[in-house]
Image (cartoon, rainbow, N blue to C red):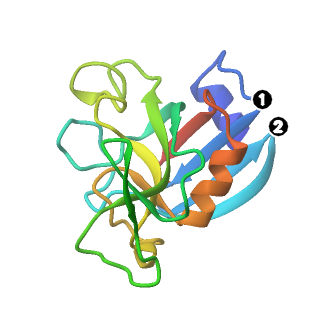
Amino acid sequence: MLLEYLAARYPGTPLDGHILYVSAARQRLFLVMDGRMQGCYPIATAKAGLGCTVDSYRTPPGLHRVAEKIGAGLPLGAVLKDRRPTGEVADLARADSAQDVITSRILWLEGLEEGANRGGMVDSHDRYIYLHGTGDEASLGRPSSLGCIRMGNADIVALFEQVPVGALVVILDN
């Protein structure tokens, strides 16, 4: 059903290969490869809901692609700031919801819908919207991020290894 929706909504978009489907309502990310679901992961989208405007702290809906992969080879829980490792490793056994640290790996998203999540004040890439590990895995399963899509550290590492740059990412409120 997802592929039929995507084909109707985004005609001409190649739908073979890897697709990451983010369900904000379910707080789950589904990995689809060559038309078959291969994985389901708990996530956390924005506490403020879906939206595209810069400084809104919302998760941008619509069609994206993985533009960059950052963090290959870093240890599980490695803390990244400004897309660079800090040398710290988060204590994943002790969640710290006071800090919204980015950990382990980053899949940096680029919007593909001009005026909706690409360009101007709605550009997902310019807003630094990522799929990334979190130092607060207890926050997964409910909207709690500042706009990015948080994942468990083992999950983002596994996804990082499977998903190529250019993979489609669709974020929907369903």
Tell which residue pokes out farthest to the bottom in this image. 94
Number of dots carrying numbers: 2
How busy is the neighbourhood of tag 2: few (under 14 within 10 Å), some, or many (20 plus)? few
In what element is the residue under mark 1? loop
Tell which residue pokes out farthest to the left in this image. 55
Residue 97 drawn at (x, y percent): 29, 75
Left or right: 15 as drawn, with respect to 101 = right
Name the residue beneath numbered marker 2.
34
Q: Amino acid at mark 1?
A: Asp
Tell which residue pokes out farthest to the front in this image. 87
How much space separates mark 1 and mark 2, taking CA atoms? 5 Å
Name the residue beneath numbered marker 1.
16
Q: Which mark is residue 112?
A: none
Rendered residue at 42%/77% (across/down):
91
Does residue 169 lie above or below 31 as drawn? above
How busy is the neighbourhood of tag 1: few (under 14 within 10 Å), some, or many (20 plus)? few
Left or right: 19 as drawn, with respect to 135 = right
- Of residue 132 and residue 171, the one placed in the foreground of this image is 132
